[in-house]
Image: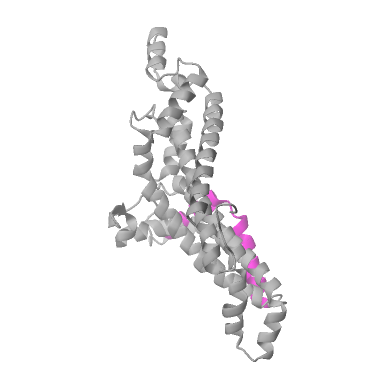
Amino acid sequence: MAAYLLQRLIQAIFVLLLVSLLIFMGVYAIGDPIELLVSPDSTVEDIERARAALGLDQPIWTQYRIYLIGLLQGDLGDSFVYNQPTIQLILQRLPATVELGLVAFFFALVMGIPLGLIAGYYADKWADHAIMNGSIFAFSLPNFWQGLLFILFFSVWLNWLPAGDRGEVDQFLGVGSSLATADGWRHIFLPAFNLALFNAALIVRLTRSSIQEVMSSEYIRYARAKGLSNRRILLRHAFRNIQIPLVTVLGLELGNLLAYGIITETVFDWPGMGQLLINSIRLNDRPVIVGYLLVVVAMFILINVVVDVLYTLLDPRIKISGSKS
């Protein structure tokens, strides 16, 4: 296990360095941020001084070399717009994004797995058709339009839930979180549910297809011949044998929820990293854009490692080592 983790750490460093180069060059090609940062009335001298102060007067490879030296020391640079360390800006917004993603992931699991099990077990029955039609509907709705409908119905018409913001925040596991207060849960419920629906529909379809495949297996027929109950067959035998492929997809979906909930954060005015990224793209704040994407890549790498370790817990026959991932 130690050799495996060391190998993945080396791979992660290599991937982050490669991604930093690609992102840095891509962001550099977008344009000159000075055009957005300085006043239109600024003189040529003022513009050149601002460019020199931000290090933008250097060749692109010199800029990347300076950025890479800082990155290897844990420094993601300073924001052009906020004039603060990028890592500080990201860490300020990260807890809100993580808690929204985790709650949405929980909602997706609670909705997706049971409905998928029912649809797969009762394939081609009325329950299967109803669940699959509902999943197609949830799968097809535009996320931003769906969020606006939720706000209109639950916040404006019924006045049950807040339409935006993070609500009251308190300490949870040493970090300020909405999950530590009742008001915070009222604020997070609607955006998390909106973010979860698409992923729940995907989990339903994956679980259903996996269960259908497993239910035709010999050991399932043998379990039925032994007179085991339908519930025991479904949960103890069928579900246990689809956990490996399910965990693989769930890991990717968790990464997507944590990294790409930008639309939901914007619609519900959720103060997470998504809003920070949108503002940074609008103002071409290079250090924040590059820093955000590197944090996203790091999260996906970490989730993949966790998924690999979960494989060994779910199926002891699977071994991981320094030579195989």
Q: Nearer the viewer, residue 103 or 297?
A: 297
Quadrant for residue 211, please give it: bottom right
Where residue 272 sits: x, y (%)? 40, 45
Where residue 112 sits: x, y (%)? 56, 66
Q: Nearer the viewer, residue 71 or 107?
A: 71
According to the image, what is the colour scheme of the structure?
A: one colour
What is the magenta segment's predominant secondary structure? helix
- Residue 228 in view of the camera: yes
- Residue 257 in view of the camera: no
Q: Is residue 220 above or below residue 38?
A: below
> In the image, what residue occupies the spot 29% across and 60% down?
181
User: Which residues lie in the magenta part?
Assistant: 126-154
Q: Quadrant of the C terminus?
A: bottom right
Quadrant for residue 178, please give it: bottom left
Extreme residue in the bottom direction = 227
129 inside magenta stretch: yes
Where residue 128 sits: x, y (%)? 66, 73
Q: Is residue 138 above or below residue 267?
A: below
> In the image, what residue occupies the spot 33% across and 28% down?
83
Where residue 85 sits: x, y (%)? 34, 33
12 inside magenta stretch: no
- Describe residue 216's horizontal placement relative to residue 179 as left or right: right
The total of numbered circles placed on residues is 0
Quadrant for residue 314, please give it: bottom right
